[in-house]
Image: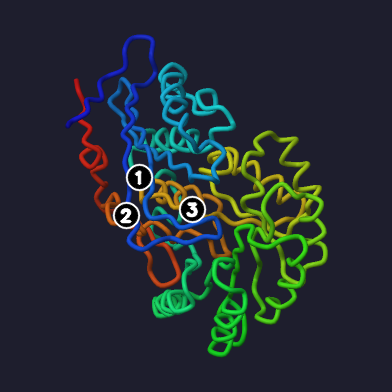
Amino acid sequence: MTLKLSVPDRGKAWKTAVVPRTLHFKEPAGTSRGVYRERQVWYVAIRDRQGRFGVGECAPLPDLSCDAGPELPARLAEACRRFEQTGSPESAATPDCPSVRFALETALAHAEAGTVRFWETPFSRGETGIPINGLVWMGSREEMARRLEAKLEAGFECIKIKIGAIGFEDELALLRHIRSLYPSPDDLELRLDANGAFTPENALERLERLAEFLPHSLEQPLRQGQWEEMHRICRESPIPIALDEELIGVSDHAGKAALLDAIRPRYVVLKPSLHGGLRGADEWVRLAKARGIGSWVTSALESNVGLNAIAQWCAVKLPEMPQGLGTGQLFTDNAEGFPIWLEGSEMRCDPAGAEPDLLGWLGIELDG
């Protein structure tokens, strides 16, 4: 069925259309919160009176995103109605709907640029790549070892390993095997992500044991909301601690500042579709930098539509440390034709390649 996207009516800035899709993972994606086998997303297409159009992705994660839930389609529809009048993602989508705001922000960036290379950067011009880490999903010890080997063969120099789903001793054995092959962080940088799998009682003991393998950092050792305990762990941990899920749902300037001042992590990990959209993530970066806290950007299981948007935004910041942008090819039914690809341990962008046919892929026809 073809969906018509007409010219906006008089008095409206934009016309919008929403297309829901269910994407399917090539392999189950395991975290300490469960295993993802499919992914519900909503694509937002916009068009203005000049015929410009753009597409953004709204992809909240169940049981994690603050705007995930059965009310999301209605909230997205209402945000689109407001956007048609104002043309402003910030006024259309409330701060507690970061995935909706991200979809509108990136659809607008696409429309204004007229290309999926949203901003003029060394990355979009094909002059430099974005360093990224290879991601090893949770699974059995054998599955994780196989996935690790594939990342190493692909040439990654920084590997992120999710821990907390298999036995801790098995995870230590896997890390021990890695360091037997690559003894130094100069040989291979290790990042660990616990996704809140530790407890206040066992976290420091586990961190002490993990420190033997010289990891760069460990993300979110405790489930979010335990500020006092998290501050204690950040202060006493032999491994630098990064916050990720902790930032979800904290949308105002004062709340962000209070969280960073209370916990004092070494890093924050920004996912725009979870952490306030592009503008909200920008604010996190600024507040963290003012406090001497480092940051990097990562995707949150978006399809290539969202991944490309995050990569183009990330490139504006001229990143030097590895980013977490390697999740775009997880699905059997992904959007194709984007100018980004992985080359060794970098994401690259073709400055001259054709534009993806997103409207055709979504079954949208421009009317009038």
Which numbered tag is attached to residue 299? 3
Residue 335 x, y percent position in the rendering: 29, 49
Which numbered tag is attached to residue 61? none
Residue 232 x, y percent position in the rendering: 82, 59
The Cα–Cα distance between marks 2 and 3, rounded to whole angstroms, is 17 Å
Residue shown at 40%/80% (left/top)?
153
Residue shown at 65%/36% (left/top)?
251
Q: Is residue 9 left or right of residue 182?
A: left
Q: Residue lying furthest bottom in this view?
A: 180
Q: Amino acid under label 3? A: Ser
Q: Residue lying furthest top in this view?
A: 10
The Cα–Cα distance between marks 3 and 1, rounded to whole angstroms, is 17 Å
Is 150 situated above or below 65?
below
Which numbered tag is attached to residue 339? 2
Q: Secondary structure at mark 1?
A: loop
| Residue indicated by mark 1 | 116
Is 255 situated above or below 328?
above
Closer to the camera in the image, 317 or 282: 282
Q: Quadrant of residue 343?
A: bottom left
Are dots 2 and 3 in contact, CB under 8 Å? no
Task: Assign the N terminus to one quadrant of the image.
Answer: top left
Are dots 1 and 2 in contact, CB under 8 Å? yes
The Cα–Cα distance between marks 1 and 2, rounded to whole angstroms, is 8 Å
